[in-house]
Amino acid sequence: MMRRIALLLLALLVAPFVAQAQTLQETPSLAADVQSGKLPSVAKRAPQQPLVVESQPGARSGGDINMLMASARDVRMMVVYGNARLVAYDDKLQLKPDLLEKIDIEEGRIFTLHLRQGHRWSDGQPFTTEDFRYWWDDVANNRELNLSGPPQDMLVDGEPPRIDIIDAQTIRYTWKQPNANFLPSIAGASPMWIFRPAHYLKKFHVKYADAKALEEAIEKERAGTWPRLHNKLDDMYRNENRDLPRLDPWIPTSRPPTQRFVFVRNPYYHRIDSKGIQLPYLDRVIMNIASGSLIPLKTGSGEADLQARYLRFDNFTFLKQGSKQYGFDVRLWQTARGSHMALFPNFNVADPEWRKVIRDVRFRRALSMAIDREEINEVLFLGLAIPANNTVLPASPLFKPEYQKAWAQFDVAAANKLLDELGLGKRDERGLRTLPDGRPLAIIVETAGENTEETDVLQLIHDSWIKIGVKLYSKPQSRDILRNRVFAGEALMSVWSGLENGVPQPGSSPSELAPTSQVQLQWPKWGQFFETGGRNGEAVDTDWGKELMALLQRWQRSFVAEEQTKIWHQMLQINIDQVTSIGIIAGVPQPVVVNNKLKNVPEKGIYNWDPGAFFGMYRPDSFWLAAQ
C-alpha cells in the first residue's frame, strides 16, 4: 500500500501541464531583430514542447519594472526570482517539471531526466545532455576546479550515482539507495546546478581550450590560472558574468561597477502562455542600487514597482500612506520561516565553562520560558504574529500545536527553579546569577545589526531575563564578522531567523533539523564536520545530536511518505525537547509593494526563501503591465 502511495505521488510530480498553446506569437520587442535576421522566429526559438501556462485576460508583452537592492551582490536575486529550475515548486509548494519536459522516478533512486527537444541557451545554442556530462566529468569531478568533489546531495553513503546518457535529451542517474535530497536540491532557491553551458565553458577548460587562447583569457581576466578563470566565469547564481549563457527568463546586460543593473528578456525562454505568447511578458527588469536603510523610503515614494526585499513589517503604515499618491498597493504576505527571529545558543562555544552550561538542557529551557512572547507580539507586531518556538507552522501537514508551545510559555518561577537545579543559585551584588567560576551570568547576544527590530526584541527579552538573574547584552556587527565569530566559537549566542522552511511536506528535506552546515549558528563546528567529511570542525558528541544525524540518514534513504513523516516528527520532537534554538515569534507578515499597473502578482502569498524563492514560485515571468 505504501509503495502504491509513493508511486502515486511520483505520478503527480511528472504530470504534464494541461494548458494548450495556440499558434506562437512573435514578441513585439524582438520583431525587429527577427526581421533583420539577428534572431530566428519565435517558432524556432521556443522548444518543440514548451512549458505552457494558462493565459490571463489582457495579458500582454512589453514594459519595464524597477526594483531596489542594497548592493551589487543582490543581482543574484534575479536568478532566485526567475526560478527556472529542472523541477520547480509551484504555488502549492509541490514539485513540477520546469526546464525538464518530464522526469521518471523509480524506487526513489533512479531518476530519468527528459529535456525539451529544441530547448536552447540564451545565446541560441542547444541545451542537451552534453551540458550535464560536462558538469559531472569536467567540473564536479575535476579536482583542480573542485577540491571537495561532487556536492553532498549527489552522494548516497558517500557513493556517486551511475550516470547513463541515453541520448541528447535523456539522462539517467542511478543510486544504489534512494536519494531523497536530489529533487529538493535541484529545485532550491540557490539550487545544485547539475549542468553547465558546455559550449561556452569549454573555451576556458584546459582539456578543451586552445592553449594560446586560454592563456590570453587568463591574462585578460587577471585570473592567474585556468581553474581560477573557469571558476570566475562559471557562476550560475551570482549574475556577475554577463557573457555566461543562461536559461533564466531575464539575462543580465550590465557590467559592474554600476548603480543600475538591467536584465532583458531571454529570447529562447522555454515557457509560453496558452495564447502562444512567449514569456516573460516583461521586456526588462531594472535593479537600482540604494542604501538598504533608504529602500523603504524610496519604495514609499514610488521608486519600485515590485518590492519586498529590505521592507519590514514596521514599514507597513508608512508605505500605506504613500500608496494612493504614488499608485501602488501594499500587500501582506505570509512568511514561512519557522521563526521570524530566534536565539541560537552555540553548542560549540570555545569557553569550557560556558560550553558546559549551554549544553545543559535545563539552561536552555529556562531561558526560553523566561521570554514573554505575548508581550513581544503585542508591542512590536500588533498581535498579528505567533508567539512560538522555532518549528513548523500550522500550514505544514507536519504541524502539531505542542511543537510551538513546549518550553515557550512565560513562566519565571519555573525558569528560576530550573536554574537553581542546575547549580546556578549564587548571585552577585546586582542580583545576577553567577557561573561556577564566579563570573556573572551575562549573555552577549551577537546580531548582524541590520535593523532596529532585533534591538527592540532583545531589549524586551533583556527585561524579562533580568527576572531570572540573567543579564543580556546585544552586540551588533556585520553579518560576516558575526558568522566568523560563531564559527570560531567566540560567540556565545546569536540572533537570526529560524527554519528557512517552516511549511515542509514529508518529502521536504529535514536537514535543517540536524547538524549539516557550518552556517547553522547553534552547531557550526558539527555542521562543518559533516560538510567536509570529517576534515574540519568537530564530530557530534551528544547522544541527541547523533540521533538527529541517524534519523536524517534514514530519511534520505526513504521514499515512502509514511516513513518520512514519522522521521520528521521524531526530529522535530528532539529539537523541541532539547531547545536547540529558542524561537521567539513566527508568522510576521511581509509587506509586498506592487505597482497598480503590474498584474498577476498574488494578493496573498507566501514569502519564503526555500522553498518558494520569494517571488519565484509565483513565476514573475507571468507578471505583466497593463496598457497605459
Image: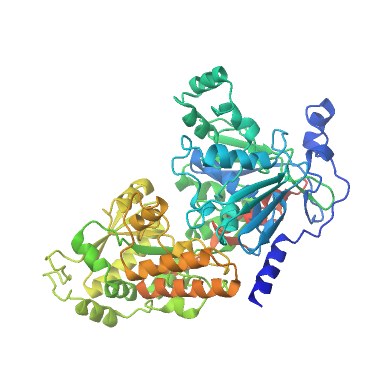
In the figure, is residue 220 to the left or right of 537? right
Q: How is the image coloured?
A: rainbow
Residue lying furthest right: 23
User: Relative to the observer, which residue lies in front, 413 or 352?
Assistant: 352
Asked whether residue 408 appears in the rendered view, the answer is: yes
- 307 above or below 136? below
x and y, in percent, of residue 410 in the image? 35, 78
In the figure, is residue 550 to the left or right of 482? right
Residue at x 47% of width, y 46% of height: 292
- 74 above or below 57? above
Q: Quadrant of the N terminus?
A: bottom right
In the figure, is residue 588 to the left or right of 596? left
- 375 above or below 232? below
Find residue 418 and report its image quarter: bottom left
In the figure, is residue 605 to the left or right of 581? right
x and y, in percent, of residue 583 in the image? 40, 68
Asked whether residue 320 appears in the rendered view, the answer is: no
The count of marks equals 0
User: Relative to the observer, which residue lies in front, 443 or 455?
Assistant: 443
Q: Quadrant of the C terminus?
A: top right
User: Relative to the observer, which residue lies in front, 403 or 119?
Assistant: 119
- 324 above or below 431? above
Find residue 474 and report its image quarter: bottom left
x and y, in percent, of residue 564 in the image? 55, 71
Residue at x 77% of width, y 36% of height: 29
User: Relative to the observer, which residue lies in front, 403 or 67?
Assistant: 403
